[in-house]
Amino acid sequence: MEILIPGLLLVALMIWASTKIKRSAAQAFEREEVDHPDFSLTKPEGFLAPVDPAEGTEFSAHSREFGRDEADRVRQAAAEVRRFEGANFEEICERVKAESDTTVAEQIGIIAERKCANIVVERSDNGAAVETFYKIIAGETAVYQLSITVLPVNKDDFSPKIEELLASFALK
């Protein structure tokens, strides 16, 4: 009896902690408004954005799952925002196309008095074919590039999330 009561309390504490951890993990993959000092965007449900973004990026997020077969080292979808200080808008657009295998689509225009380009390319990532959607916006002192990479077999599943990311990305 002396061991039973502390044992039950320990089990109850472990169940409570486990439930709390599971809830926190599930919340990390929920939709979230990201408010960066230079830009804002909406991280769609199903993406995890680490507290510290990947090196060289202002923001990064990725899907929970990896691809299959030859794409087993590539996330089904990943997004990142890069900042190119003092860069030329046209050069960044050309670099995106030069580093890809095929340019699928390209639209260039002006949104909110800023040069903006939407470019879709096909390329290879760790030996796997991927499709990458870019939204490039010229800021006052830097060029910002949102890139969303998706495995072609998962493109239909992620299309609404890709559209949400592209549509919500804006400079301040």
Image: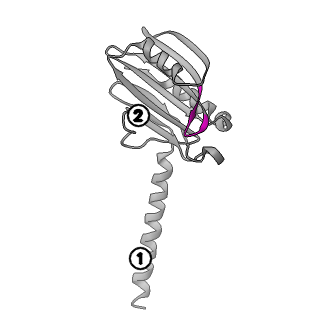
Q: Which residue was labeled with disc 1?
A: 10
Packing grade of label 1 (10 A; few <14, some 14-19, many >=20) is few
Where is residue 109? Give x, y as percent: 51, 8
User: Is 69 positioned to the left or the right of 109 in the image?
Assistant: right
Quadrant containing the N terminus in the rendered view: bottom left
Where is residue 105? Give x, y as percent: 61, 17
Q: Residue at left 51%, top 50%?
A: 26
- The answer to which of 46 and 105 lies nearer the viewer is 105
Q: Which residue was labeled with disc 2?
A: 59
Where is residue 68? Give x, y as percent: 64, 47
Name the main secondary structure of what is drawn in magenta. strand
Q: Is residue 145 visible?
A: yes
**Amino acid type indicated by mark 2:** Phe
User: Is 156 positioned to the left or the right of 40 in the image?
Assistant: right
Label 2 vs label 1, nearer the camera: 2
User: Is 115 positioned to the left or the right of 69 in the image?
Assistant: left
**Residue 129 figure quarter:** top right
Packing grade of label 2 (10 A; few <14, some 14-19, many >=20) is many
Q: State the residue lying farthest toward the bottom.
A: 1
For the image shown, how many numbered marks are present on the structure?
2
Position above or below: 126 against 88: below
* Residue 124 part of the magenta-drawn span: yes
Q: Residue at left 58%, top 46%?
A: 66
Segment colored magenta: 122-129
**Residue 137 figure quarter:** top left
Q: How is the image coloured?
A: one colour
Q: CA distance from mark 2 to mark 1?
A: 40 Å
Q: Earlier in the sequence, mark 2 or mark 1?
A: 1
